[in-house]
Image (cartoon, rainbow, N blue to C red):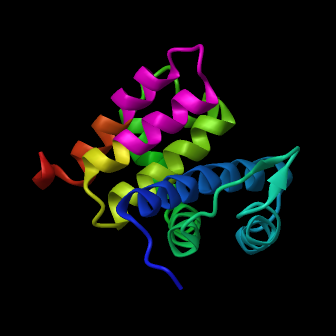
Amino acid sequence: MTELSGNQKRRMKAAARLYAVQALFQMETSGQTADQVVVEFLDHRFGSSYDGAEMIDGDISLFRRIVDLAVNYQAPVDQMTDRALVAKWPIARIDPTLRGLFRAAGAELSQTDTPPKVVISEYVDLARAFHPEGKEASFVNAVLDHMAREARPEAF
């Protein structure tokens, strides 16, 4: 097996985060379990082709870890997200894609040693990809900054 470049590793981690957000969204909207969704993604999304476009392989261990952490720590992550949101906008009122994004990012912020700036940057990029015309990226940046300062105050 060939050694992956730093850029390839970063792209695979970014893809894993994208797939994790999509998997969390799918779990919420379909009622599937984490195990069901993870298997489906690994079998049908990682490295697959859709309409001639090839999906990038993701970092499988990071994908699994984010989904597992987001599910296992959903309540505390949701509470942390609620504290970062304006009082009139509890997490239940947030778009389900952004809810999945906040859960994945919150799990990574609170349960891994990934630098908060990396987590924030990666998930803000995902918000831009999901909502290219809107203000969601700025919103996500502000919420994740607040969450990161709560979860990892020593990093600031």
Q: Is residue 130 above or below residue 35?
A: above
User: 10 or 135, which lies in front?
Assistant: 10
Q: Is residue 137 above or below residue 150?
A: above
In the figure, residue 109 lies in which quadrant?
bottom left
The span shown in magenta is 121-143
Quarter of the image for the C terminus: give it.
top left
Which residue lies at the image location 65% right of the left edge and 30% below the top edge?
A: 95
Q: Indicate the position of residue 89 as horizontal and vertical percent values.
A: 52, 24
Q: Indicate the position of residue 117 as horizontal and vertical percent values.
A: 26, 45
Q: Is residue 89 above or below residue 68?
A: above
User: 88 or 3, which lies in front?
Assistant: 3
In the figure, residue 82 lies in which quadrant?
top left
User: Does the image show residue 90?
Assistant: no
In this rendering, position of residue 53 left or right of residue 125: right
In the figure, residue 133 lies in which quadrant?
top right
User: Does the image show residue 147?
Assistant: yes
Which residue lies at the image location 49% right of the left edge and 64% below the top edge?
A: 73
Taking the magenta stretch, the answer to whether it contains residue 122 is yes
In this rendering, position of residue 22 left or right of residue 107: right
User: 34 or 53, which lies in front?
Assistant: 53
Q: Indicate the position of residue 71 as horizontal and vertical percent values.
A: 59, 64
Q: Is residue 122 above or below residue 4?
A: above
Which residue lies at the image location 52% right of the left edge and 50% below the top edge?
A: 103
User: 68 or 82, which lies in front?
Assistant: 68
In this rendering, position of residue 124 left or right of residue 16: left
Which residue lies at the image location 73% right of the left edge and 70% below the top edge?
A: 42
